[in-house]
Image (cartoon, grey):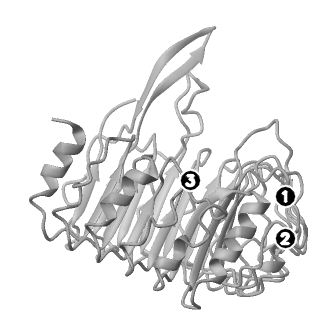
Amino acid sequence: MTEDTHLTKLLAHTPRLQTLGVKGAALSVSADLLRYTPHLEALHLELRNPAVELVQLLAHVPHLTHLTVAPSTPLPETFLATVPQLTHLTVKEGLAPCASPNLLAAVPRLTRFAVRMDADTEALACLESTLHQLASDLTELEVELLNLQDLNVEILPNLPQLTHLTLDVTGMAALPEHLLAQAPALTHLTLQGVNNSNLPAVILPAGFLAHTPRLPNLTLKVYRLAGLSPDLLVPVPSLRQLQFDTSSMKSLPTGFLDPVPQLTELRMKVGGTNLPADFLMHAPHLEVLHLNVQSLGSLPANFLTSAPRLVDLYLRMPLLQALPPTFLVHAPRLETLELKAGHGIVGNYAKCNQNPPGPRNFPEHFLSHAPRLVELYLRVPMLQALPPSFLDHAPLLETMEVEYAYSGYCFGYGHKDLLKVVMPLRSLPENFLTHTPNLRYLNLQTGYV
């Protein structure tokens, strides 16, 4: 029995199936694969099959509203003819807007369209023409552009519906200041690039965001930033979510977050970067803070003073030795705390005769200032004990994980050995969970180093 026949027979017993996802290498697709799923509404296919093999599948699912495909060949113009109710379409590979300019004409109800394609000027012009044929119902357009070696200010066509834009800027040294002039409706902007020290660092001009004044979500996954202008965020005062990587920078500009006082989510990786003293001073509405801090061994007790609304805190600090007992005193609304600390020596370049740094225990009343805590994750290599009353002030706690394990190699005296580190926590006090009646999920790891 072939794989596609087996899958077809498997689906024969699911007449009410509404959502189906199939990912993997290309397989010979039977025309009857979806014969027994007439009520299917969402289909996610990433099989890398020729588009012509996928056309025959859609004839069996006339009620389809959500479709994701990644064929190995361009989509024919009649690809969507049998799914007129489609509202969400994602094409990860295979879009050829110049060869199939009327592809989307068969789906007049389309409201969300996402496409991943090479940054070819001619293809983008054809995409613009295709989208202009759509009704004004298109509310979300997501475009991911690859291979931007010849990036210029004219590469983006006039797409007034564009809300989500992802640009792969690998290899680019500088971005045109007016690149986003054709996308005033952007709500999500992502710049990404591979981490390669042989490539030039990317420069973001100070006025890069000047044409997107309403931008609420910005992600910079460039890895090699030449620097951030102190005024980069001035044009986007409504920014709510910011994610970026400063691993290649030595410092953040003073007052970098001052122009975005409405910020509610901040996720950042800090390599050798020093955090300014006023880092969080102008982010009073911050609710989510995820920090990957590679170079600091401690944080001051007043670090969270300016973030009283914080509900989600994630700290990944390889060199952390301890946190102040009153560290959470200014975060009374905290609901989720995840701490991955002290694993700086654990890794591919570990020395065989060294144990990881990090907290061996926590202060007895460390959580007493976070009475709303619901989720707690402690991933600390050298944790040996927790005080008996550690959870006495966390009555709402529902999820708790205390675990850490690592297997890899260490180096010493010219040779390489296997290294295994397991959290040395032996046991917990008998009455440790007395004050957590709402606990629903518990994951504990005990072991040795």
Q: What's the residue type where badge 1 is placed? A: Leu
Nearest to the observer: residue 222 or residue 170: 170
Instruction: Say which of 184 and 279 sits in front.
Output: 184
Q: Nearer the viewer, residue 45 or 390?
A: 45
Looking at the rendered structure, the secondary structure element under dot 3 is strand
Callout in the foreground (1, 3): 1
- In the picture, measured across the screen, residue 374 lies left or right of residue 235, that is left
Name the quadrant containing residue 442.
Answer: bottom left
Q: Which residue is denoted by mark 1 in the rendering?
A: 151
Q: Which residue is mark 2?
A: 179
Which of the labelled discs sits on residue 403, or is there none? none
Q: Secondary structure at mark 1?
A: loop
Real-space Cα separation, disc 3 to disc 2, in angstroms = 34 Å
Q: CA distance from mark 2 to mark 1?
A: 9 Å
**Rendered location of residue 361, percent (x, y):** 44, 50
On residue 316, which mark appears?
Answer: 3
Question: Hey, which residue is sitting farthest bottom in the picture?
Answer: 136
